[in-house]
Image: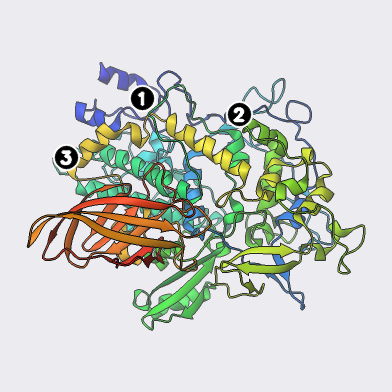
Amino acid sequence: MLAAALTALFAGSGLVAPAAPSALESSWAGGQSLDGRGNNVLRPDWGRAGTKYSRVTDARYADGRSTPVGGPNARTVSNRVFNDEFVDDKGFGFSVNIFSEQQLSQWSWVWGQFIDHEFGLRSGVLSSDPQGERADVPVNGKDPLETRGDPAALRFTRSTPAPGTGVTTPREQINNVSSYLDASAVYSTDDRRLEWLREGPVDGNLANNGAKLLMPDEYLPRRDARGDTASAPEVELGGELITNPGQAVVTGDARANNNTGVTAVETLIAREHNRIVDALPASLDEQEKFEIARRVVIAEVQYITYNEFLPAHGIRLPGYRGYNPLVDATLSNEFSTVGYRIHSMIHSGFPMETERSRYTDEQMQKFRDMGFNIDPSEDPAKVKLQFVLAQARDNPMILPMVGLGPFLQGLGSKAQYHNDEQIEREIRDVLCSAPDANPKCVFDLGALDVERGRDHGMPSYNEMRRAYGLPAKTSFKDITGESTETFPADPQLTPGDEINDPDSVDFTRITNLFGSEVTAENDPEDTSAVSYARRTPLAARLKALYGSVDKLDAYVGMLAEKHSGPEFGELQRAMWSREFQRLRDGDRFFYGNQMPVLDRIAKRYGIDFRANLGDLIARNTDLERSDLAGNVFFAKGQVPPQSCRVGYRTTARTGTDSGTYEATVRVTNTTRRPIDAWALRFRYPDEQEITGTRGAVGKQNGTDVSLTNPPADGAIEPGETREIALTGTWRGRDGIPSSFTLNTTRCRAEQGSG
């Protein structure tokens, strides 16, 4: 019966159906498709690739069907709201370095982009898609704040409308990937692409594929890896890859070459898949090993997202109560088009500090020729390298040159940018790369985000707030938290035309984590600057542009909101909370609903999905775990030194030369902000081994111990003391641990503690 069902399923696909799986294999796969089909048995199309985005509220078009609602020119808005440029007395402009107040590392936006490629790909992005209408954004070359002379326009193409929409019914858009967090960015959403990605022949016969993913020299395969570039899966090509398409890498998602960050994460996850396959017994057949590895990798991606990534951003979801088939996990248009656009967090520099011996003199010269910044390290055996986003875009060759380990370690070494209305010049005000490389073309991601919201029929800012259960705002200053929304009487400004005066966006004060003022030209390696003031209130600029709060674009208003918690304002936090709860509760294959299978894998093969991102990096590179932060979503250093206090007390002990012990660890948050995602690390002095924890997830490697926040109720509020109970065994002596750190910051130890 199963064989017949498989034959019917593959009929007409051009592929040969695999042999009917064994009962064991079926239990590993659990019926999880590549494209999300059938995740919900009652509603098999919910979340499926190739279906419409869902809507939280009604679409908003000028004609009720398709024409975008008007508003201030998107480039004009970008130059006055998203502009992060400081111009010195000599007329030289550069981005001001304002960083995350939580000191979130660059892993935040890089992992964020990876999972964005997991659950969202609007139709119209790839060249093979049916294309929407060209709707370029005009640019006023005489605008006093226009820095690029007289560009003709910002190139913009509308998303492809869903069939049957936009004529008599409101225009909708198609999501071409599965909405679920199912590692589809690595495995793909279709069998043909996955067959190419797996070891073995590409002959249309899925039954003879290998268990491993194709990874020549442990890196993602290039389009020419199998010799015939023409038959390789489609990838999005830009820059030099247009003339050298064989150098583009192939993975489950067509956007893997977008930048080195996303290429690196997909390389890491593919290596993890192959590592798991290697750990499985040879007695299993190739398909069984593939399905087990895929099941574990999906759970790992979900576990990291819900236990590290989201808590780091202050997203606290209600406790998991199991799968709910009545919850539609289909990605919402509002979240994809507005809420998840975190481009203001992107810091274009990719810093690394690693052993000089990794690279030959020829390689170092190649780095110089490519425009890398190369500086000596304080450690004479090491070297500092840095390249920028412009070099990382459409350039997958960089990753094997610098090495996966040093690159991933570098992502955790520095903070990302502050999540606010500012967007770095590197992605907001740059000349286009190929195929639009001409002096009349400018790339402005902020302006395109505004225009995309209008293209997709997004509600206004206040309508969006109401849709997410939040009250409407009545003034612009109510949004920004400023005391006024009028321009100041300032001799530097043009009275009555302040909005068009370039001095209106001057930075007048920049303050670091410790409350000290720093200069706009501060050391780019100093990531402590977290707040600022400008010559004019943001609220005044918004009022001059939009006139009424009710006309404000939802994306602009969301970014302009005063933060009511770590990293996010009210609206963005509400949008993330709703979406990620639905992605969890409406996913039949969420790890919390797959524990019987995952526990069986752990018991039978010793493979546990409960690993944090730092663990995955250490397992799949030549880095030691101690080279990385306990929680890599927080940058090392640059945080207030007295952010925590730790006490350790042994409460019970048996034996004389060896035995068991019980202990309590007390962690106190001494800051004025919640610590939403945390990793407490310390070192035992002798042979002590933790056997159980309560109040944290425990890991031990030799004498090094890490305790990370539990999946639910993990935040430590300001002034709160969190108790963690430990049980374990000891031999030799039962000593007091030392070197307590919380998110890489040294904690003050209470008397009697190390």
Mark 3–mark 2 Cα distance, whole angstroms, equals 43 Å
Q: Which residue is mark 1?
A: 10
Percent x, y of residue 2: 26, 19
Q: Which residue is mark 2?
A: 55
Q: Which residue is mark 3?
A: 604
Q: Are marks 3 and 2 in contact (CB under 8 Å)?
A: no
Observer-side mark, 1 or 3, equals: 3
Mark 2, residues whose alpha carbon is within 10 Å: few (<14), some, or many (≥20)?
some
The image's colour scheme reads rainbow
Left or right for 71, reference 394: right
- Nearer to us in this view, 601 or 210: 601
- Three-letter code for the amino acid on which mark 2 is drawn: Arg
Q: Residue at x 31, y 40 (%)?
A: 294
Mark 1, residues whose alpha carbon is within 10 Å: few (<14), some, or many (≥20)?
few
Mark 2–mark 1 Cα distance, whole angstroms, equals 32 Å
Residue lying furthest top in this view?
1
